[in-house]
Amino acid sequence: MKDILQCQFGCGKRIRHETVEFSDGLKIRVPREEVDNSIHDCPNLPNIDPHELELDGEDGSWRPNTKALAPTEKEDYDEFVEEQGDAWQKESIIKHFEDLNEDFLAIDGLEFKNIRHSVKKNLVKQLDKIPQFFYTINLWGGDEDLPACLQTDAKGYGQFIPAELLGLFYQMDGGIEGLEDAKKCYKILKETGWIKIVGKENQTPSQKIEEMDEWIEDAKQELLIDSDGSLMEPGTYHEVALRKPDVLETKPDDENVKIDNQKLREEIDQFEEEDLHNFILYKFPGTKLIEKLKTLEAFPKKTTLYEKYEEMLKTEKEKSVLEKQGTPLSYLDFGDKNTIMRQMIKISYWYMLTNIKTRRNDLDHADDTPKELKKARQDDEITLNRKTRDEIHLVKNEFERLKNK
Ligand SMILES: [Zn+2]
């Protein structure tokens, strides 16, 4: 097969497709022009509105203004038909971009990796069908606000081009692999030259790429820190990744997983109630905490955290026989504490906090999985637990660093 062909949308330009592969197995094809290798912004595809294409003329002919997207010069047309066969109908292109717009309406839960992954997967699928990297995607939250890093214009709305949105999703996934994936996307974004700042943060695509490099470096450094906080010999971090949790001498069986899950559940509680709790109190001593709570919205919004606290206090006074002494923070949950932390910690650590909470929620749910399936998942459970312990460790280190600042 020839790797340089006429553009399949009939603009007459000769292009090749570069495949970019991500660590989760997803792939995109980037159309590049033969002449200067730049990313092809096809004049026959819409950039914002699916209806940019005009629907007049005759069907299937090589003459201008037809319903089909084919070259207007006879010679180009003949070559096009030979290489591509049928031309795209303008109507199906319009339908494609109308559907794409609909795919980004009312999306909640993008702070969760599995939901991000399904949105990501769909975007990649659509890009595979029609590789258009110069298109404005309007992302709308449903009942909830979008995650902060995806709000560009309002709490429930963000505007992106495809490589930008993919990049932000991978950046949210985090980890060295996620950051490397994000970097690939930001490189494409930079090449499009379409936007000056990425997401809501005041950064150019180039600055985003530099930031990814920094974070990747940080992440590699973090891996050098052993679980007791001591520095490991450089080069040994592969062993850390392969390290089995202390409780497990052999391959996990059902009982071991159960024990490890229970143990982790307690470790997470201890982390939340001591480390996270005390760090927030340290940052907001005395009445400063109440002031802060009045400025933050509880999830899923409508009230402030302070109002939520007052409500909890009231309920408890009605129900309880023993009056509890505690700061307002004692009445708030892990999610609320993460809301407070959002502006206080680097975003990469904040994602770790949300991951830890997600794992805690998973462990709280009764597991009715049939025994055979459970068996297949044992290794995954242990890996997740190990990852969560690493995250607790990294966040605790970051707390110490921030306290000493
Ligand atoms: Zn084209």
Image (tube, rainbow, N blue to C red):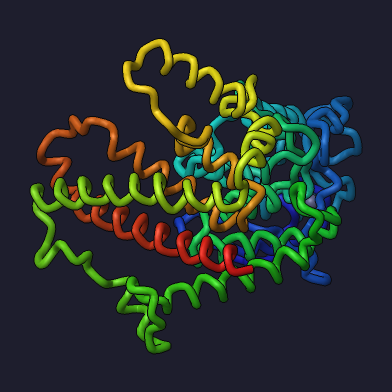
Q: Is residue 388 above or below residue 51?
A: below
Instruction: State the quadrant of the C terminus.
Output: bottom right
Say left or right for 159 vs 279: right
The residue shown at (60%, 47%) is 285
The foreground one among 40 and 231 is 231
Residue 49 horizontal/vertical position (percent) = 82, 32
The foreground one among 213 and 341 is 341
The residue shown at (76%, 52%) is 201
Does the image show residue 106? no
For the image, the number of numbered tags is 0
The residue shown at (76%, 66%) is 207
Residue lying furthest top: 318
The residue shown at (61%, 55%) is 345
Residue 74 horizontal/vertical position (percent) = 86, 49
Say left or right for 70 vs 238: right
Residue 348 horizontal/vertical position (percent) = 57, 58
Say left or right for 324 vs 27: left
Does the image show residue 229? yes
Instruction: State the quadrant of the N terminus.
Output: bottom right
The foreground one among 18 and 273 is 273
Residue 342 horizontal/vertical position (percent) = 61, 46
